[in-house]
Image: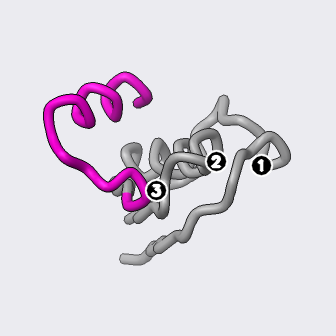
Amino acid sequence: FDALVTRIGQSHCIDRTRIFSYGFSMGGGFSLILGCVRGDVLRGIGVVAGGWLPPAPRPSRCTGHVAAWITQGS
């Protein structure tokens, strides 16, 4: 993730205060983890039908705070 943000930032003009992660299912679980471990980089996350993936970091080890839109349902 860090390498991707760096690479895109080198080739494109990006606003680093508006970086978001969105995912569905396992991608949603990954977005949850990114929101925890890269909360100092991300502004927010969007999760559709995703869950906390083991082995995920414990919430007590999270950095920063992110806005989150999380939806589950049939």
Q: Which mark is residue 41?
A: none
Comparing labels 1 and 3, the label whose residue is closer to the camera: 1
Write down the residue under mark 3.
Answer: 50
Q: Which residues are magenta?
A: 1-18
* Residue 66 located left or right of residue 4: right
For this view, does 61 lie left or right of residue 54? right
User: Do labels 3 and 2 touch, CB within 8 Å?
Assistant: no
Query: Which residue does the numbered mark 1 point to in the structure image?
Result: 59
The kind of secondary structure element at disc 1 is helix
Which residue is farthest left? 11
- Of marks 3 and 2, the one in the foreground: 2
User: How many numbered marks, from 0 up?
Assistant: 3
Asked whether the beta carbons under mark 2 and mark 1 sit within 8 Å of each other, the answer is yes
Task: Estimate the x, y position of residue 50 in percent, counting from the top left.
Answer: 46, 56
Would you identify the image quadrant in which residue 57 lies? top right
Marks 1 and 3, the one that precedes in the sequence: 3
Q: Secondary structure at mark 3?
A: loop
Graded by Cα atoms within 10 Å as few (under 14), some (14 to 19) or many (20 or more), the crowding at tag 2 reads many
Tell me the CA gap for discs 2 and 1.
Answer: 7 Å
Q: Are marks 1 and 3 in contact (CB under 8 Å)?
A: no
Q: Is residue 60 above or below residue 46?
A: above
Residue at 37 percent of width and 22 percent of height = 3
- What is the number of the mark on residue 36? 2
